[in-house]
Amino acid sequence: MDLVAKLTPRLQSEAPLLDTWASKLQRKLGTLWVSVHTLLTRYIKRIHVNMTNGENLFFENGETPGKYDIVNLILTPNKTFQYVQVGSYMKSAPYGRQFTINESLIKWNVRFKQVPHSVCSNSCIPGYRKVLRESQQKCCYDCVLCSEGEISNDTDMMNCIRCLDHEWSNEKRNMCISRTVDFLSYGDPLGISLCVCAIQLSLLTLVVLATFLKHKDTPIVKANNRELSYILLISLTLSFLCALLFIGQPNIITCIFQQAAFGIVFTIAISSVLAKTVTVLIAFNSIKPGSKSRRWMSSQVSMYLVCLCSFGEIIICFGGFFYSPPFPHFDTSERSLKMTLYCNQGSANTFYVAVGYMIFLAVISFIIAFLARKLPDNFNEASHITFSMLVFCSVWISFFPAYLSTKGKYMTAVEIFAMLASSTGLLTCIFFPKCYIIIIRPDLNTKQSLIGKKEKFAGCAIEVK
């Protein structure tokens, strides 16, 4: 006990030194083990042993290459099972000979009428894509037909391939084919119908113009500013013929003249109607005692008004042309085998501003004609102008939603229909009543019939000299 008591303080004082030696010894042993492990690993990787059965034994990534026997479980007539090796898989064999199987040794159960499939779904043929079934094995999937404009040209494709813009998928969805070009042509039934209507209406307008020229000295022609009537009839004829620029295969020339000719010709027609409306209002105001409106009763004033209003449309059209010139363009946004060839106007805002400017002039003319509606009916055409402007504004206001809701060549057809309908409204409402009097009731085409019994209008004539 005395010896233990004497050694204990000394051992306690030497304990830290012993711990240090133990740690160093542990590190040395760990380093030695790592070195031995590394040497053994390098040695094992270089081991190639030829077994007695002729097989070559070696290690790959710490393991021997796998070898598996493929066996066929056969139920014998005496209700026992027999295992027959029909093939093998040897990873170490040369490429192409790793998997071997002898199909003649395989015996299927008599319940199988044919060789069973190893997957639960058949292969997807070209034109279809694979869609995996949720919460099932990867070998279980559905075959879904590719969408329009997409194809799959191989079996078991997971994704379809999208065709180029100028191509579309065939019915089987296994090949991209070139799209056919579609436009409003003269061979199309719709194009033929619109073309025939445009030509017939233009000829009808020329007949009306010829009637006015033949009876230019009659009171009903003289009473409503002959020059403005001639300008209006000529512009209506050109507006009908403008529709022909929109039919046929678009090219650079037609694209340049389409909207410019349409906008300028229609603006001249509306400006002529506006000038006629202003002329009617000034004419009736000029008969008041002390009125100074008579000095505005001049053909030059009417021509200046037509030129001024038309100049605004010319600026809009040419400004839009230089800012973004029109050009032929293929519309490939439609999901069909056809792609529409049409005239891209460059800036759609220019087209809307041009049409809006025409509607603005028509609204002004409508307001002025509406204010003059209570003037003597025998003597003015304000009521006819009111109805014509009402028809014109109704057509073009309803044009915008119809134009924006259509696609392809039908957009062009809607624009042509609006042109023909609005021009026909002007021709019918303004000139047909006068033609009725000139041709059918010539007895009413006299100054007395126009003036009627109101003597206070006897000294006034609306003809601008």
Image (tube, helix red, strand yellow):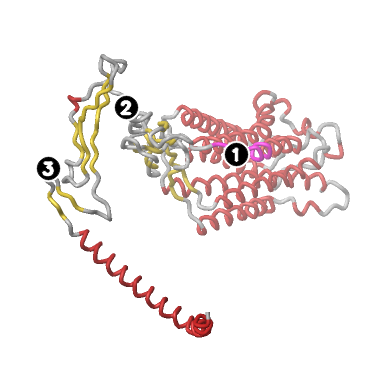
According to the image, label 1 marks what residue? 233
Side of 411 relative to 223 (left or right): left
Instruction: Give how far apart the Cα atoms at labels 2 and 1 are.
Output: 82 Å
Q: Quickly name the residue at label 3.
A: 53
Circle 2/circle 3 CB separation < 8 Å: no
Q: Nearer the viewer, residue 59 or 115?
A: 59
What's the residue type where badge 1 is placed?
A: Leu
Residue 79 seen anywhere in this rendered image of the structure: yes
Label 2 SS: loop
Residue under pointer 2: 117
Residue 231, image quadrant: top right
**Where's residue 267, x and y in %?**
61, 47
Left or right of residue 13, residue 455 in this image: right
Mark 2 and mark 3: Cα distance apart in space: 36 Å
Nearer to me, 22 or 217 = 22
User: Residue 284, how many percent across, how many down?
Assistant: 81, 44
Query: SS of the residue at dot 1?
Result: helix
Residue bounds of the magenta highlight? 393-406
